[in-house]
Image: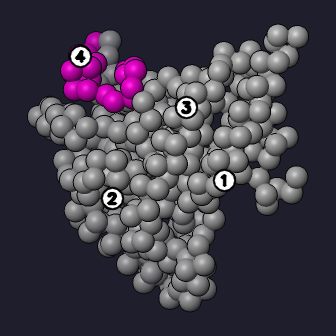
Amino acid sequence: MNPSEWIDLRSDTVTRPTAAMRRAMAEAEVGDDVYGEDPTVNRLERRAAEIFGKEAGLFVPTGTMGNTIAVKVHTNHGQEVICEARSHVLSFELAMMAWFSGCVARAVRAEDGVLRWSRIRPEIRPLGPHWAPTGLIEIENTHNMAGGTVMPVEAIEEICDGAHGLGLKVHMDGARVFNAAAHLGRPVSEITAKVDTVMFCLSKGLGAPVGSTLVGTAADMARGRLYRKRLGGGMRQVGVLAAAGLIALDEMPNRLGEDHENAQFLAEALARIPGIRIPHEVQTNIVIFDVSGTGLASSEFSARLKERGVLINGINPTQMRLLTHFDANRTACERALEAIGQVAAGAAVAKEA
Ligand SMILES: *Cc1c(COP(=O)(O)O)cnc(C)c1O
């Protein structure tokens, strides 16, 4: 099968820029962003700050760089960063908090991915004869590996109030915070009002080809600019990317509900397939499903789906994770479902034989 016909549900990063984004990129007004002179980047950073109700924004090439800069801005070498055990900053960012910021993660497991102040508080350490002090609290919303779960706003506010009371900052990895907002029916500014910095991705469900943005105080973003340069993120005439980001930011959040409906549709249908189990409640655009009941390892399940033109990866030997997005409409989801049904049924026949 031709790769252009694949139904790719491996991630929402696979979305391609819309026609409007491509036009805006071609026509973008640009300057040298290292001098702060790219008008389109400046517009994107201002617009992001405005939407989140923060003082300033910083356009970065990737979410990983945004999180890395935030950790660096808030911490000193030799501190701990409290985060959820399966968080992106700990599991999928090549130990950048150690490599760049000299910090170690203090991982706290929350089954649904939603950290609570009651779990965080006992893990906070002062500097002592044996301890590295806590430097930062990091929360992930939506939580990727817990299946796109949404943090209740009260839980976020309780964490921020508690942390601030102890002089600690809170960073939100909001790669998919617009999905959280769509689920709650509230603006991102309400969800993140008390958080010190937020990183969000333009290149996932919002459909931009490249880019993420960090928002926070003007002072933190000014320091962040220096770290961005150190990390190789001084991108010159990068308004060509920010132009797509502006469209992503203004026009795409409103359509995320559609992705969530497709995820619900898939989750309900998958739960009816013998051998497949959905371990978590599906709230946004991520569906984790367990295929161990089919007798197939997730890697084999994935390989058999690929033969049918459907791309979905395993996240461990028994579980797979699919994401719905703008480039996979309901018809594509129906075709993916059919392929999953065929693979599961094929495995059941083989098991009986
Ligand atoms: C995708 C993602 C990021 C950033 O990923 P990049 O590939 O570096 O842009 C950060 N956090 C979470 C939770 C993510 O899902």
Q: Nearer the viewer, residue 271 or 176?
A: 271
Q: Position of residue 164 (x, y in %)?
A: 15, 38
Residue 94: give its label.
none
Q: Is mark 2 within 8 Å of ligand 1?
A: no
From the viewer's perspective, is 227 left or right of 195? right
The residue shown at (76%, 25%) is 345
The residues colored magenta run 105-129
The dot on residue 215 is 2
Mark 4 C-beta to ligand 1 under 8 Å: no
Amino acid tagged 2: Val
Q: Label 4 vs label 2: CA separation?
A: 29 Å
Which residue type does callout 4 highlight? Pro
Which residue matches tag 1? 332
The CA distance from mark 1 to mark 4 is: 46 Å
Is 335 left or right of 148, judged from the image as shown? right
The span from disc 2 to disc 3 (Cα, nearest Å) is: 30 Å
